Image: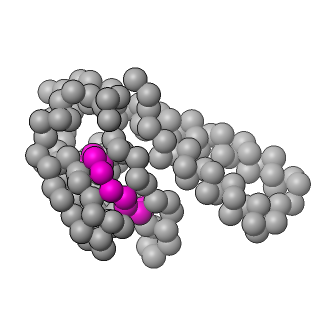
Amino acid sequence: MNSLPECFRNLPKQRLDPDHVLIQEGVPCRTMYILELGAVEILKGSMRITTIDTPGSVFGEISTLLNEAPIGSVRVLEPTLLSVINDPRTFLIQNPEVALYVATVLARRVKAVTEFLKDAREGAAAAPTRADMDDMLDSFAKRVFDLPRF
């Protein structure tokens, strides 16, 4: 976890067991989380979008920045340790290196979406099979949730 901003180390920690719903789609959440150990899944409705087990992954940043209810759910898959930011807007203002980290995560997601849309348009011309589309979507989800390197 040496690529993470130093100030993450002093944040409060939370341990969660499998099946705990960390963030519930549509339910206001005013907390941001950073994955230290473990694994979670991202859900939209009952559909699994992806699983994440990379230390440093951030959750709750979209609803924090947009001041809206979460667009998906985050459920714990295995014993998990998280850093917790209880007042993320204030924390981001006071910690510009964390704000840059979150901005970089979001920029990588926008880049991945742009690349995916290009690939999908090119793939549609070749009439991909359902398996091809599933592979493309899995690859896309991994790129979207990849972490920035500092």
Image quadrant occupied by the N terminus: top left
Residue 24 visible in rendering: no
Image quadrant occupied by the C terminus: top left
x, y percentage for residue 60?
29, 51
Horizontally, is 43 left or right of 27 in the view? right
The majority secondary structure of the magenta stretch comes to strand
- The part of the image, by quadrant, that contains residue 73 is bottom left
Horizontally, is 128 left or right of 114 in the view? right
Q: Give whichever of 119, 22 is nearer the camera.
A: 22
Horizontally, is 46 left or right of 60 in the view? right
Q: Residue at the location (33% across, 41% down)?
A: 56
**Is the residue 57 above or below the residue 131 in the image?**
above
Q: Which residues are magenta?
A: 33-42
**Is the residue 78 above or below the residue 14 in the image?**
below
Q: Residue at the location (58% across, 41% down)?
A: 112
x, y percentage for residue 2?
32, 29
